[in-house]
Image (tube, rainbow, N blue to C red):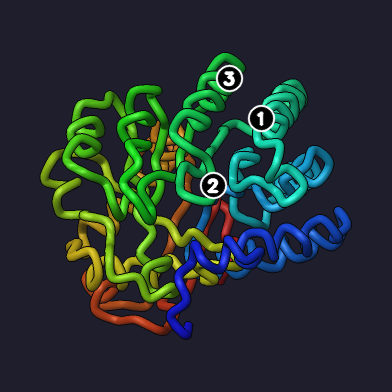
């Protein structure tokens, strides 16, 4: 909040690495209690399905423990959970001089996670202070061979070519994209079904001037989703209504575009577009009822929660 660059904080052992230290010390029950509390808060703000990424253990045991917690959260009164293995978040301190050994560890852990069906997706953070384009390609290749769905953190702070790489690999979704270049846009425009997931709460929280080019993405017919990116370091909010308001202001999206981005396009970003994300016969009955006169108020108002009732799978879970 004092203007220190995010990557500088990471280089000095803060940010993600600070959370890693706390997560490694937490028991399964500690993580489960915390996760259940925040899932209730997500539900109160209208989220009926969410993705949980690991990535805050960066060792075999903690990554698996986080994903076991995600699986344990399959409870009727909570949002539905989809799990993603993000061992490729950053390189932990004990492996900074042995990057190749850490890549080996990610791969062996991924194989174990797949064997136990702990995660549907595999994600990598391609960025300075995280993983190079070549390392990212290696990890995506391995994960694709294991038949994971692929995801990617790309072009958040620098233009790396990761968006084009993700499109070439058929990634289900690519997050961030603040610094995507013309080649990356062209690659996403020709990709078969990759969803661009934009995270304006990160820009708001970190005070970043560069935002994802939502208008260019939409004008190129690239499907755009919105998410909170709820995490301890760069976006500590469970509120999708706030994200919609930020998308309208920072990304210049219309309210209708933001609603599509938080419903049907978000569902496709989890390979669930045929099951949820719109009100159609045969889909799961997930409904959010808001205290507003019409849909445009979701973009017009901010800083309060308009959600009054939530139905998941036909059951009233918040009233």
Packing grade of label 3 (10 A; few <14, some 14-19, many >=20) is: some
Packing grade of label 2 (10 A; few <14, some 14-19, many >=20) is: some
**Please, what secondary structure does the residue beneath circle 2 have?**
loop
Residue receiving disc 3 = 142
As drawn, which residue projects farthest toward the left?
219
In this rendering, is residue 261 above or below 108?
A: below
In this rendering, is residue 77 above or below 119?
A: below
First in sequence, mark 3 or 2: give its number: 2
Nearer the observer, disc 1 or disc 2?
1
Residue receiving disc 1 = 100
- Residue at x 84%, y 41% (from the top left corner): 61
Looking at the picture, how far across and down is residue 262, in whole percent? 36, 54
First in sequence, mark 1 or 3: give its number: 1
Looking at the picture, how far across and down is residue 171, in whole percent? 41, 30
Question: From the image, which quarter does the C terminus lie in?
Answer: bottom right
In this rendering, is residue 301 above or below 231?
A: below
As drawn, which residue projects farthest toward the front?
97
**Please, what secondary structure does the residue beneath circle 1 have?**
helix
Q: CA distance from mark 1 to mark 2?
A: 13 Å
- Residue at x 31%, y 29% (from the top left corner): 193
Name the disc covering residue 130, or none. Answer: 2
Nearer the observer, disc 1 or disc 3?
1
Question: Nearest the camera: 103 or 167?
Answer: 103
């Amino acid at each position: 909040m004092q203007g220190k660059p995010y990557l500088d904080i990471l280089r000095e052992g803060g940010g993600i690495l600070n959370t890693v230290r706390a997560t490694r010390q937490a028991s399964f029950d500690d993580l489960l209690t915390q996760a259940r509390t925040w899932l209730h808060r997500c539900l109160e703000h209208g989220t009926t399905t969410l993705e949980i990424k690991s990535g805050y253990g960066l060792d075999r045991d903690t990554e698996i423990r986080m994903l076991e917690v995600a699986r344990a959260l399959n409870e009727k009164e909570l949002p539905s959970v989809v799990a993603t293995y993000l061992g490729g978040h950053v390189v932990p301190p004990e492996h900074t001089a042995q990057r190749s050994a850490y890549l080996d560890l990610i791969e062996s852990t991924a194989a174990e996670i797949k064997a136990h069906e702990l995660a549907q997706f595999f994600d990598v953070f391609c960025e300075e202070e995280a993983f190079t384009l070549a390392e990212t390609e290696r990890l995506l290749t391995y994960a694709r061979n294991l038949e994971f769905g692929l995801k990617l953190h790309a072009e958040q702070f620098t233009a790396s070519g990761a968006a084009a790489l993700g499109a070439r690999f058929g990634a289900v979704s690519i997050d961030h994209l603040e610094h995507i270049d013309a080649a990356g846009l062209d690659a996403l425009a020709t990709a078969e079904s990759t969803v661009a997931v934009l995270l304006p709460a990160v820009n708001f929280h970190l005070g970043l001037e560069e935002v994802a080019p939502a208008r260019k993405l939409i004008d190129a017919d690239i499907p755009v989703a919105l998410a909170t990116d709820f995490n301890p370091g760069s976006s500590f909010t469970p509120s999708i209504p706030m994200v919609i308001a930020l998308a309208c202001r920072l990304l210049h999206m219309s309210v209708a575009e933001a609603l599509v981005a938080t419903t049907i396009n978000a569902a496709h970003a989890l390979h669930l577009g045929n099951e949820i994300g719109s009100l159609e016969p045969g889909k799961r009955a997930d409904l959010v009822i808001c205290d507003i006169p019409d849909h445009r108020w979701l973009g017009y108002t901010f800083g309060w929660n308009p959600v009054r009732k939530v139905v998941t799978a036909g059951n009233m879970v918040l009233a």
